[in-house]
Image (cartoon, helix red, strand yellow):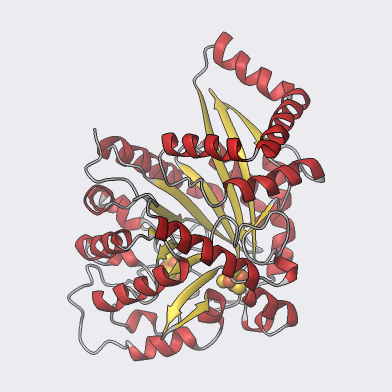
Amino acid sequence: MVCMHSSQRRITSKEEWEERRRLYGERWRSLPNSARVPGQLAGRAAVGCGATHHVMERCNFSCTCCYLGPQANQTEPLPFEDVAAQLDEIRRRLGPRGKTQITAGEVTLLPVDELGRIVAYARSIGLDPMVMTHGQRFLDEPEYLKRLVQEYGLEKISIHIDTTQRGRRSVGMVKEEGELTEVREQFATLIRDVRHETGCRLSAASTITVTEDNVEQLADVVNWFYRNADAFRLLSFQPVANVGRTRRLHESAQVRDVLWKQVNRASGRPINEAPLSFGHPECNRTVPLLIVRSGERVRLFESVRSGNQFDANVLSEAIDVFGNRVRWAESLGINVWRTLVCLLKHPRFLLKAVIYGIVRLVSEWRFFWGVLLDTVLKLKRTRASIFLFVVHSFMDAKEMDTDIGKERLDACVFKVPVDGRFVSMCEMNASELRRTIDSRLRKKKPSSKVIEEPGR
Ligand code: SF4
Ligand code: SF4
């Protein structure tokens, strides 16, 4: 099957490259010193990430940890023109291929043509949209996702699945993350099927709200994601913040400590917790891994090993060399070509990269030998996938008001356009801002746009 729409438009014009370079420079200069760490991506490989709000603020789930305001389910969805204005503002702030989350409450409560129109508009102005959802609509009506991909050019989705959720009909209320394995399997199958049936790119992420109640159960979940890294390329852990309609107070700092122990347990060794940062290191930690699955055997390869300065230097230089040129969203051919051009332009880095390759090949000969043996001699099916862990720690009002909280807001890389300002998602959720906008959009009459009444 050949995809009917063109893949995400490349940056080709000189003006767009220059705009991007200017925005990167501005972003880097705006970072506080505490965020100018070697693995920093902001200002070197991205400007930041934008998000919409109030596209469809209602949600038909009622999770125990939720950033929505108490009036969310009484709001009207924004008219298309207002959503388009938000997207225009994001495009202005983030530049070409700006990463944009199409989110609110639950945007898939909109009819597919409404949501598709938003996705198509985002693409048409040069943004890189990702639909954020609990995904139930996709399971109930697989055609919904297929149409978004095939007709409107959606290339990225992120699905929230965890035990804090209330409202997933197929499982009811679950206490153990393990009870959600079947749901995760259903999504993985759906993602593979849609790719196969449409011939289009579809990149998937999953988010998990981490609380004291589920954190100890996450090692098995991580293992599941390792085995299914071909379907989901990113797993974002979000330690709970005491905002919105979250039902009880949680201790997010404690949760963060336990969380990484679970990742290490699943990985069978200590994994470097913060090789990359996006914004302030206290906000966002990103861990890229190469996952190689041969039959049932899963092997991990870390680009930067814990405490290894040479690995960290190579990665930092790689961000400077490739950050503005190589984009995962583009085709493999284009990225290979750009990688070669970058390497030829930076012969010193090329030499360093070769040395790094040799050092890793020798020190991790067991990894490479094992993959070779399984693939060539044992004829096992081998698949390699780049996989990202992200830990995004949102703040509550109290944290935001501390010195470090203010520094984090200065370095914020996740923002929403509100009345001409580009405000941090933390400010949106932990201040009165979201509730104020909710009040403006209080429903006057039943909306014709809503396809399913929220079941709260
Ligand atoms: S899925 Fe849950 S957390 Fe997300 S908006 Fe709905 S109720 Fe809130
Ligand atoms: S939204 Fe909050 S946690 Fe996320 S990057 Fe911005 S300030 Fe940090």
Q: Which residue appears farthest toward the left when viewing the image?
A: 448
Classify 429 as above or below 167: below
The part of the image, by quadrant, that contains residue 311 is: top right
Question: Does residue 152 appear anywhere in the picture?
Answer: yes
Q: Residue 77 placed where, x, y %?
A: 29, 77
Image quarter where the C terminus lies is bottom left
Q: Nearer the viewer, residue 307 or 45?
A: 45
Viewer-proximal residue, 189 or 18? 18
- Using the rendered view, name the quadrant where residue 226 is placed: top right
Left or right of 100? Residue 242 is: right
Residue at left offset 49%, top offset 20%? 381
Q: In the picture, residue 401 is in which quadrant?
A: bottom right
Q: Residue at x 24, y 33 (%)?
A: 1
- Could you say where residue 132 lies in the image, as x and y percent from the top left? 41, 61
Q: Residue at x 45, y 87 (%)?
A: 435
* Front-lying residue, 54 or 260: 54
Q: Position of residue 52 (x, y in %)?
A: 40, 71
Q: Quadrant of ligand 2?
A: bottom right
Looking at the image, which is closer to me, 229 or 154?
A: 154
Q: Residue at x 75, y 46 (%)?
A: 313
Q: Is residue 298 above or below residue 260?
A: above
The answer to whether one can see residue 394 in this image is: no
From this viewpoint, which residue is outermost toward the top?
377
